[in-house]
Amino acid sequence: DGGITQSPKYLFRKEGQNVTLSCEQNLNHDAMYWYRQDPGQGLRLIYYSQIVNDFQKGDIAEGYSVSREKKESFPLTVTSAQKNPTAFYLCASSIEPPSAGYGYTFGSGTRLTVV
Amino acid sequence: AQSVAQPEDQVNVAEGNPLTVKCTYSVSGNPYLFWYVQYPNRGLQFLLKYITGDNLVKGSYGFEAEFNKSQTSFHLKKPSALVSDSALYFCAVSPGPFYGNNRLAFGKGNQVVVIP
């Protein structure tokens, strides 16, 4: 079955550590996205990529980095510069352009906690 | 840029009663509209969408939504709520073809609580 896989489901980070969240899709989607979700704040866009080897900052990119070396993969690194990284992170993908009307497919999320 | 408003933080409804979750939007041109549902510690799941055609759209789990262009609304409805419908619901909009920045804009979400 086609889908989008995020790993790990739960992740614990010590202060000052970088951590990388994995996102893999086998839907042959061109575009991929990373969102951060905090209680009561909805979804906030971190980064997105419309094509391999290219990506753009979203609304809250500071303290995060991404790469898009393969169409199937869009890993997110939460760096030590991100001062409040505890949150639920969601990856999504879509056919490009989204105006094709298919919406987004979401992964099941990674919950990151700073310990 | 496109935007979505979901005016209520939480919707409480008794089991068996009709459920309505409100959504209004702002977008250039004709909108593409979506509803997603999220259960705790899970990703968003697609419920239904409006692209064109009939203003009443039917989706998964007995949900439907009505597109109202004059009121720029796309309210989600279910005739008889179940306890299992308790979840977080997101409305999203993107502009149709030929408009730039065609990414989805999400509302902040509405928590639905169905009371047994």
Image (cartoon, rainbow, N blue to C red):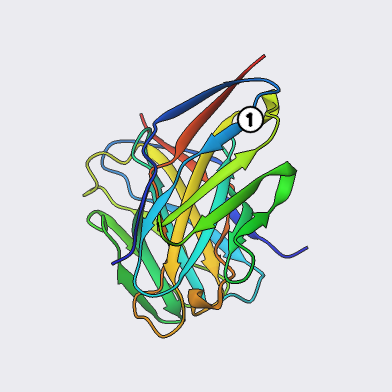
Q: Residue furthest bottom?
A: B98
Q: Which residue lies at the image location 51% right of the left edge and 79% below the top edge?
A: A96
In the rendered image, residue B31, in percent from the top left (x then y), is placed at 45, 68
**Residue B108 in sight here:** yes
Amino acid at dot 1: Pro
Q: Which residue lies at the image location 33% right of the left edge and 50% below the top edge?
A: A18
In this rendering, position of residue A80 left or right of residue B30: left
Characterize the local packing of mark 1: few (<14), some (14-19) or many (20 or more) Cα atoms within 10 angstroms: few
Q: Is residue B49 above or below residue A50?
A: above
**Image quadrant in which the N terminus of chain B is located:** bottom left
In the rendered image, residue B88, in percent from the top left (x then y), is placed at 52, 36
**Image quadrant in which the C terminus of chain B is located:** top right
- Give the chain of mark 1: B
Q: Which residue lies at the image location 38% right of the left edge and 38% below the top edge?
A: A87
In the rendered image, residue A40, in percent from the top left (x then y), is placed at 36, 34
Q: Nearer the viewer, residue A32 or B116?
A: B116
Q: Is residue A79 above or below residue A75?
A: above
Q: Nearer the viewer, residue B18 or A113?
A: B18
In this rendering, position of residue A61 left or right of residue B31: left
In this rendering, position of residue A100 left or right of residue B79: left
- Pointer 1 residue: B18
Q: Residue furthest right?
A: A1
**Residue B43 in sight here:** no
Quick one: SS at disc 1?
loop
Q: Is residue B109 above or below residue B93?
A: above
